[in-house]
Image (tube, rainbow, N blue to C red):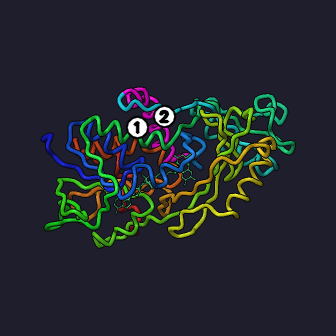
């Protein structure tokens, strides 16, 4: 593949920037076009969990991708941090999944059954054992599943590091620049329309997160991605009451490297409304304080909300668009875009550089055809 082959990436979130980082590293000419600021979408809001077991409801293709991506993150992070000069604050803190009822215990023990053979050290703790490892847990906890090898990072820093790393490798990052449409000729996408004029490329990668569904019309196809709002907040509680992620249902508390504790989340169908609400934040606080009562003493530091890009089965949509050449999708990462960014960047790069179609096949748009 000639090194002047130009790839245009629509969207400067974690997915677009990871694709750019990999492609620029393979010697391609890359332009990321972001209508706001890099990381200004869901990626800058995310809690930053790199948690392949905890983000996967059952074994299957998602688990395979998640485990591969986690391993790739750990392999790439030292180099990325050196190239970009940005510390992404990765902490292998472990995760404690709490049980409050016999139903919770059954659900967690069922997870443990398929997770144990993976060699990630998961183990069941009684309520006393759980309190030995996390003394600040609420009184009502009846037991817990400990997953010691999962962790988290600062997602805003990860996106900036990927963008900076891609730029150091020669990629152009256009911010405050909206893609208004696609250029095409005889079934091949040949570039994008920008406010300043046309930009031509051999490939266009659509990595526009929750907005991807709006752009299927450019190609006359349905790209089934819609926004699901997630709210989140950070508190400063001194001293920090927990040392690992504490999680129950939709609610989690993350002890961050800067001493804050991030509390999440909600999962709401709210269209493209991406602001936090009093009701959403009040619900998170009520549930989080039940898990770890000491956080109630913390100062409110920041609230955010973001739009997760959701596909009908909650899994990413990766690869070609049937009937078109020159365009690839990298969308629909829902709750796991930070986790899956490493493997997504690699697989899209391998497709463009080596024509490696096989790894993308299970994630293709055509799985929704029937
Ligand atoms: C509260 C919350 C917590 C989360 N926690 C985690 C977590 O712990 N771990 C995890 O793995 N995932 C987590 N996620 C999910 C994760 O944030 C997403 O899956 C991921 O950020 C999606 O990345 P993306 O690059 O596809 O989308 P985005 O980050 O939204 O980026 C898409 C970009 O495309 C740009 N764009 C759109 N249209 C255009 C256009 N026409 N022209 C130019 N640019 C355009 C947007 O401005 C945006 O910046 C969380 C999400 C939320 C909301």
Q: Residue furthest right?
A: 139
> Residue at the spot x=42%, y=57% of the render?
209
Residue 186 lies in the magenta stretch: no
Image spot of residue 12 (x, y percent): 37, 51
Q: Earlier in the sequence, mark 1 or mark 2?
A: 2
How many C-alpha atoms fall within 10 Å of the one at disc 1: few (<14), some, or many (≥20)?
many
> Residue at the spot x=18%, y=54% of the render?
201
> Residue at the spot x=27%, y=67% of the render?
181
> Residue at the spot x=46%, y=53% of the render?
333
* Label at residue 91: none
Q: Main secondary structure of the magenta part?
A: helix
* Label at residue 88: 2
In the depicted structure, whether residue 214 falls above or below residue 252: below
Image spot of residue 337 (x, y percent): 47, 49
Quarter of the figure that contains the N terminus: top left
Of residues 253 and 148, the one nearer the viewer is 253
Q: Is residue 318 visible?
A: yes
Image spot of residue 325 (x, y percent): 21, 59
Note whether ligand 1 is within 8 Å of mark 2. Answer: no
Q: Mark 1 = which residue?
A: 161
Please state the extent of the stretch shown in magenta in the rendering.
59-82
The answer to whether marks 1 and 2 mark residues whose Cβ atoms lie closer than 8 Å is yes
Q: Is residue 124 visible?
A: no
The secondary structure type at the circle numbered 1 is helix
Residue 210 horizontal side relative to residue 147, left or right? left
The secondary structure type at the circle numbered 2 is loop
Residue 70 lies in the magenta stretch: yes
């Amino acid at each position: 593949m000639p090194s002047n082959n130009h790839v245009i990436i629509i969207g400067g979130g974690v997915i677009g920037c990871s694709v750019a980082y990999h492609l620029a590293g393979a010697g391609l000419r890359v332009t990321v076009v972001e209508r706001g600021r890099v990381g200004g979408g869901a990626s800058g809001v995310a809690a930053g969990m790199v948690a392949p077991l905890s983000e996967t409801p059952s074994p299957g293709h998602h688990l395979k991708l998640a485990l591969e991506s986690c391993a790739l993150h750990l392999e790439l992070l030292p180099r990325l941090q050196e190239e970009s000069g940005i510390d992404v604050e990765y902490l292998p803190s472990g995760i404690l999944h709490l049980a409050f009822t016999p139903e919770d215990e059954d659900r967690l023990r069922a997870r443990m059954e398929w997770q144990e053979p993976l060699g990630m050290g998961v183990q069941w703790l009684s309520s006393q054992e759980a309190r030995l490892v996390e003394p600040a847990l609420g009184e009502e906890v009846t037991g817990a599943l400990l997953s010691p090898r999962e962790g988290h990072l600062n997602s805003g820093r990860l996106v900036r590091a990927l963008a900076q790393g891609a730029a150091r490798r020669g990629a152009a990052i256009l911010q405050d620049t909206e893609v208004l449409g696609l250029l095409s000729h005889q079934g091949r996408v040949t570039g994008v329309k920008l406010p300043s004029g046309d930009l031509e490329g051999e490939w266009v990668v659509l990595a526009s997160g929750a907005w991807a569904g709006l752009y299927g019309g450019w190609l006359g196809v349905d790209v089934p991605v819609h926004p699901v709002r997630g709210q989140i907040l950070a508190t400063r509680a001194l001293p920090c009451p927990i040392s690992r992620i504490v999680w129950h249902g939709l609610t989690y508390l993350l002890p961050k490297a800067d001493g804050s504790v991030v509390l999440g989340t909600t999962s709401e169908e709210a269209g493209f409304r991406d602001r936090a609400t009093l009701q959403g934040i009040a619900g998170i606080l009520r549930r989080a304080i039940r898990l770890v009562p000491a956080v109630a003493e913390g100062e409110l530091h920041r609230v955010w909300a973001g739009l997760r890009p959701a596909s009908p089965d909650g899994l990413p949509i990766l690869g070609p668009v049937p009937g078109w050449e020159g365009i690839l999708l990298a969308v629909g990462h829902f709750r796991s875009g930070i986790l899956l960014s490493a493997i997504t960047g690699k697989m899209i790069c391998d497709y463009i550089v080596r024509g490696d179609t096989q790894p993308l096949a299970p994630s293709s748009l055509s799985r929704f055809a029937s």
